[in-house]
Image (spheres, rainbow, N blue to C red):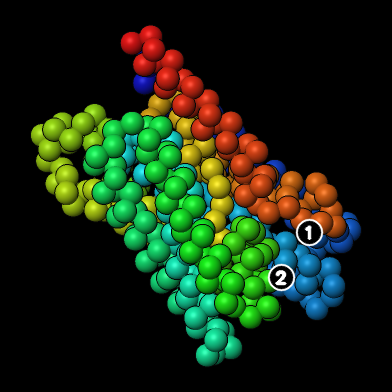
Amino acid sequence: MKKPYRAIRAGAVFGLLAAAFAAMVVANVNTGSVSITPGEILRLLLNGGTDGTPAGNVIWKIRLPRLLAAAVLGGALSVSGFLLQTFFRNPIAGPYVLGISSGAKMLVGMTMVLVLRYVSGVPFWGVMAASFLGSMLVTLLVLLFARRVKSMAALLVIGIMIGSVCTAVTDFFITFADEANVANLHAWSMGSFSAASWPHLAAVSGVILVAVAGAFLLSKPIGAYQLGENYARSMGVNVKAFRVALIGLSSVLSACVTALSGPISFVGVAVPHMTKLLFGTAKPALIIPGSFLLGGVFCMGCDLIARTAFSPSELAISTVTAVFGAPVVIALMVKRQRRRDNG
């Protein structure tokens, strides 16, 4: 009886997520400071491209790239968080909490400040490379501490401290940047999907989809690893290579997000746990695609709030994601502490 029930539940959850995803797409396309009728929006979408009118430019050059960036990057952060939680066996592990996003931001900020002193712009592939190297640098640093620290709270504090140091280094380099570049760097460092363009989104989406597909192909090894390293070895998993793959994939996903939109807080921690609650299981074959979908829905919803709550002023996306994501982290820590007290 359990298998049919789980299959029905999984199907219902995926259906619910698909419906929520579609609803968020409609809400984001229809909402903004420029009022466009639903009929006009439908006509512009069916045209397959902008017709040169102000409404066409708003839909095809602003709203569509932005909502797709929120969907794809939100999914990438969620899957990255799930991989990190699996790797560290820690429910609060995530790109932002462990300082990995801050490491990516630091190296991107340094690169932009140094390069912009000599040339007029930084190619996007350079930003992507700097973001990946920054993510890997901090990940390796966290790994060194994680071997010595087993406490969840201690690892959280270490991640916060590493993130603070990276932010301080970023601010130091920004001090020596030109005023025009400072404004751009500050806006980027606050986190936003507004800078998404079709070429950059296409490049990032390609990398993200390959990385998510790679993570999904590792579903069976991840499931074995969740039961312990010894069990994974007994099932024929090369644990060393597997751990490298997990870290590599999570760093690529985190780097793509930071390169395009800046650091975004708490999505990578909160969404995987919300997905597990919905499905009632931690089975990777369900959680990876489920997290990707829910992460997209979550970030599209947060972005909608960020740009409309105090319109025409816009909130940083991390401001909104923190409001909804931080309580999940707090609840996880309280729940874990209660288990220890009762056990």
Q: For the residues labelled 2 and 1, say whether their Cβ atoms are less than 8 Å apart.
A: no
- Residue 253 position, x and y percent, is 43, 56
**Residue occupying image coordinates x 80% and y 46%:** 309
Which quarter of the image is occupied by the N terminus? top left
Amino acid at pointer 1: Leu
Residue 131, horizontal then vertical, whole percent: 44, 66
Closer to the observer: label 2 or label 1?
A: 2
Residue 256 vs residue 327: left or right? left
* Secondary element at image label 2: helix
On-image quarter of the C terminus? top left
Instruction: Look at the picture and state if 9 lies above or below 266.
Output: above
* Amino acid type for the residue under numbered disc 2: Lys
**Residue under the point 49% across and 22% down:** 334
Which class describes the residues within 10 Å of circle 1: few (<14), some (14-19), or many (20+)? few
Label at residue 61: 2
Residue situated in front as seen by the camera: 201 or 135: 135
User: Where on the picture, by quarter, is residue 23?
Assistant: top right
Q: Residue at x 14, y 46 (%)?
A: 238
In the rendered image, residue 86, in percent from the top left (x then y), is placed at: 33, 39
Residue 152 position, x and y percent, is 37, 32
Is residue 194 among the parts visible in the rendering? yes
Q: Secondary structure at mark 1?
A: helix
- Relative to residue 102, is residue 83 drawn left or right? left
Q: Residues within 10 Å of mark 2 (few under 14, many from 20)?
A: some
User: In the rendered image of this protein, does residue 185 appear above or below residue 274?
Assistant: below
User: Dot 1 corresponds to which residue?
Assistant: 42
Inter-mark Cα distance, 2 to 1: 15 Å
Does residue 105 show up? no
Q: Quadrant of residue 15?
A: top right
Q: Residue at x 49, y 81 (%)?
A: 114
